[in-house]
Amino acid sequence: MTEKRIPFNQPYMTGRELEYIAQAHANGHLSGDGQFTKKCQAWLEEKTGAKKALLTHSCTAALEMAAFLADIQPGDEVIMPSYTFVSTANAFVLRGGVPVFVDIRPDTLNIDEMKIEAAVTPRTKAIVPVHYAGVACEMDAIIKIARRNNLLVIEDAAHAGLAFYKGKSLGTLGHFGTYSFHETKNIIAGEGGALLLNDLSFADRAEIIREKGTNRNQFYRGQVDKYTWVDIGSSYLPGEVIAAFLLAQMEAAESITGLRLKIWQKYHEALASLEAAGALRRPVVPQDCQHNAHMYYALLSPGIDRRAVLAEFERSNILSVFHYVPLHSAPAGQRYCRTHGDLAVTNAASDRLIRLPLWVGLTETQQNKVIEALRRAVKSA
Ligand SMILES: *Cc1c(COP(=O)(O)O)cnc(C)c1O
């Protein structure tokens, strides 16, 4: 068998990345906050409507900045799902905060907004909704709970670039939103991210935290006459080579989303009969949500053995993966976090979910092979 393996993900290049990197090189400004960074930030502000966007070197970095801005003190609690990537929790643990996990909804696998308020205590500082697969959490309800309890809302929008809730960009509904441009996301820079600020009262401190605790940005703008250490902070800004790469991706962002949506839709149509036969459940996208085809997943029905399904993919030379190991069951999650209520939906999703290959350039032939392998697998599993 010489047939080529179908990878789970393959980074897509728009064709202009190297040209922009050459320009950054010619500009002679390679550290952060040069022309390309400014263009990327302007693009984010224009496309999302965020009041201010700051490029970071990852979504993890943007979440860490949000934890600084939320002024998390040791023992402060932050409510979030357990069904997420480690950085959602780790960013707050680094400040001494305690992630408090509540269960997710069975339909979207997003945090169950009905379970949030019961988890609020006098130590709660923030709610961190994660827009799983680029499908929005129930933000109206979450924002109401946050207002009633005087909490900050930090959206982990790592999956959610160019996805919307009631016409508004994800990442712009809470106080802060965090984006990822990791190679596995829709729009990429290798490693990269952004912090969106939707309340400008945090803007000065955000710039300072990102610039090692200094007021360098204010100094460059002539607002202060010397540049000095004024607060705690770290180095969260990417260099211009990363920003140059990212700008090329941003310019093609709408077409990338469109191509991904076509692939997503084909899976969705093809899997309808398997859903009708009771073998699996397809993703649910509520009416108010416009998703971005970040991911195509299926939840296998209880009678179907996931290991057997993955083995069939393996035999067919297709790489399919699953995630997440829920954070409450991970060693560091047990050490640093707590749960509120049972996490039955989280545990079930973690045991039964599979993700199918989805990347720009996946051919129809390849996609048909994936679909056929899945059909064979659920029949024999
Ligand atoms: C990818 C991801 C992150 C981390 O993004 P990086 O840019 O790799 O730091 C955080 N949260 C979620 C939900 C993610 O999927």
Image: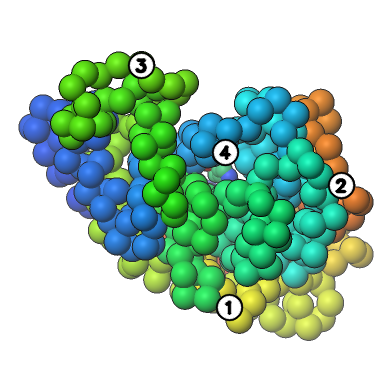
Q: Determine whether label 1 and label 4 are within 8 Å by CB.
A: no
Q: Distance of mark 4 from mark 3, alpha carbons?
A: 20 Å
Q: Is mark 2 within 8 Å of ligand 1?
A: no
As helix, strand or loop, the secondary structure at mark 3 comes to loop
For disc 2, the neighbor class at 10 Å (few under 14, some 14 to 19, many from 20) is some
Mark 4 surroundings: few (<14), some (14-19) or many (≥20) residues within 10 A = some
Q: Distance between the residues labelled 1 and 4?
A: 28 Å
Q: Say whether marks 4 and 3 touch (CB < 8 Å).
A: no
Q: Which amino acid does label 2 sit on?
A: His
Q: How crowded is mark 3: few (under 14 residues within 10 Å), some or many (20 or more)?
A: few
Does the residue tagged 4 have its C-beta within 8 Å of any atom of ligand 1? no
* Residue at the left extreme, as displayed: 26
User: Label 1, label 3: how many angstroms apart (C-alpha)?
Assistant: 45 Å
In primary-sequence order, the first of circles 4 and 2 is 4
The answer to whether any part of residue 322 appears in the image is: no
- At x 47%, y 59%, the residue is 172
Contact flag, marks 1 and 3 (Cβ < 8 Å): no
Q: Earlier in the sequence, mark 1 or mark 2?
A: 1
Q: Which residue is drawn at 40% across and 71% down?
A: 258
Q: Is mark 4 on a helix, strand or loop?
A: loop
Compare marks 1 and 4 and give the one earlier in the sequence.
4
Q: Mark 3 points at which residue?
A: 229
Q: Quadrant of ligand 1?
A: top right
- What kind of residue is marked 1? Asp
Vertical side of 249 occupied by 54: above or below: above
Between residue 50 and residue 284, name the one nearer to us.
Answer: 50
Tell me whether circle 2 and circle 3 mark residues in contact (CB < 8 Å).
no
What amino acid type is highlighted by mark number 3? Trp
Q: In the image, which disc is placed on residue 340?
A: 2
What element does badge 1 sit on? loop
Q: Which of marks 2 and 3 is nearer the N terminus?
A: 3
From the viewer's side, name the closer residue of 361 and 85. 85
